[in-house]
Image: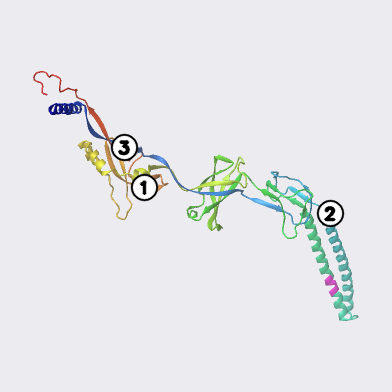
Amino acid sequence: MKKKILYIGSAVVILIAGYFGFRSFQSAEQIFAFETAKIGKGTISNTITATGTIEAIKTVAVGTQVSGVIEKIFVDFNSQVKKGQLLAQIDETPLLAQLQQSKASVDQADAQVKYQKATYDRFQVLIGKKLIAQSDFDLAEYNYNNALASLSSAKSVYDKNKINLSYARIYSPIDGIILNRAVDEGQTVAASFNTPTLFSIANDLTQMRVEAKVDEADIGQISMNQRVQFTVDAYPDLKFAGSVTEIRMQPVVTSNVVTYTVIVQASNPELKLMPGMTASITIFVNEKKDITIVPGKALRFTPDEVIYSAYLKTVPVEDIKKMVPKIQKIDPSQKDLNFIWTKNGGVIQKNEVKIGSNDGINYELVSGLNEGDEIILSMTAEKATVEKKTASKSPFMPQRPGQKR
């Protein structure tokens, strides 16, 4: 019984060994994969973002210097006006009454001057003949000079009332468009303490400006004439262009946050931009166009030593000689060196390069490589399996004479 079990177990082992022995076996080799890119032309730009309010280049608040009732208004919202055009008229009745009263005061003062002058002239002749006392002559002279002063004062009041009458008609000081009309006909305006605003006029809405609030951490990067792009909520798909025209030094502190006002001027030929709109602006503080650029990933790439050593074993000897790193003469004072690996067929090579500006993604390539060169971004190695098939044979099948088992 034991021998029978032993024979069965031996047969099972032989069958298993034969199964695995006669199966196809596998051998492994490495396949190297490269992620590469071509050196080309591009744009590098660093930007600062901020928000601001759109305003007209020049806005004038038109008021009145006299009090009264608005008798007539000749313009309305969005009316186009010319310089000197009549906008509104205040009731002139009380102003005319004051003018007439002052005119009467002038006439009265003028009559008094004539009377006192005649008295003065007579007393001057008499004093020359010593027919009157000196005190009488002095009094006549005083009355004459006093009458002259009263006439001058009356004329001043008359001129003032005449000017106030002219103020009853409100004229446009500039060419432009009426943004706001703050009064209606029949409304009373009082100019006792300050000048009430009747109209707001923008001179030219085809040119607008953005008053942007730039954080104190970014204001040092802003300079005049920098290019600006901005959008408004009314046209989210449109980008408007402008440039920096003014950097104000007065800080604006809001909730302990310090910002500075930067003025951006932009054209508005289609009048899509309106005063008061909120703009989201992007200021291009550093921008270079049509320059040779390389991805930052290429500068950060260094092949793994194990993978690199394995790859060298697959490269022909004549190509190994070509893989000597291209290293330029290094300035001892230069601390930061940059290298980029290139691929030319099966040859990979380390190259020293000089870089310039960057935007965090791409870098300006100053020297070391040329446009069109293929640069390596990553390198990996994978195991590949290759099946080697052999004819399946059974240990229990009879063999031909002379064939080895």
Which quadrant holds the C terminus?
top left
Q: Which residue in the rendered view is the most extreme toward the front?
A: 1
Towards the viewer: 52 or 139: 52
Color encoding of the figure: rainbow
| Mark 2–mark 3 CB contact (< 8 Å) | no
Q: Residue at x 87, y 65 (%)?
A: 108
**Label 2 is placed on what type of residue?**
Thr
Q: Which mark is residue 93?
A: 2
The residues bearing labels 2 and 3 have C-alpha atoms spaced at a distance of 93 Å
Q: Which residue in the rendered view is the most extreme toward the right?
A: 131
Q: Which residue is drawn at 9% across and 18% down?
A: 401
Q: Does residue 58 appear in this view? A: yes
Question: How would you classify the magenta stretch by its main secondary structure?
Answer: helix
Tell me which numbered mark, 2 or 1, is placed earlier along the sequence.
Answer: 2
Q: Name the residue under label 3.
A: 34
**Label 3 is placed on what type of residue?**
Phe
Residue 314: percent from left, percent from top = 22, 36
Specify start and end residues of the magenta stretch as a single range: 142-146
| Residue 144 on the magenta segment | yes
Query: Which numbered mark, 2 or 3, is in the foreground of this view?
Result: 3
Residue 252: percent from left, percent from top = 56, 57
Q: How crowded is mark 1: few (under 14 residues within 10 Å), some or many (20 or more)?
A: some
| Mark 2–mark 1 CB contact (< 8 Å) | no
Tell me which numbered mark, 1 or 3, is placed earlier along the sequence.
Answer: 3
The residues bearing labels 1 and 3 have C-alpha atoms spaced at a distance of 23 Å
Q: How crowded is mark 3: few (under 14 residues within 10 Å), some or many (20 or more)?
A: few
**Label 1 is placed on what type of residue?**
Ile
Dividing the picture into quadrants, the one containing residue 308 is: top left
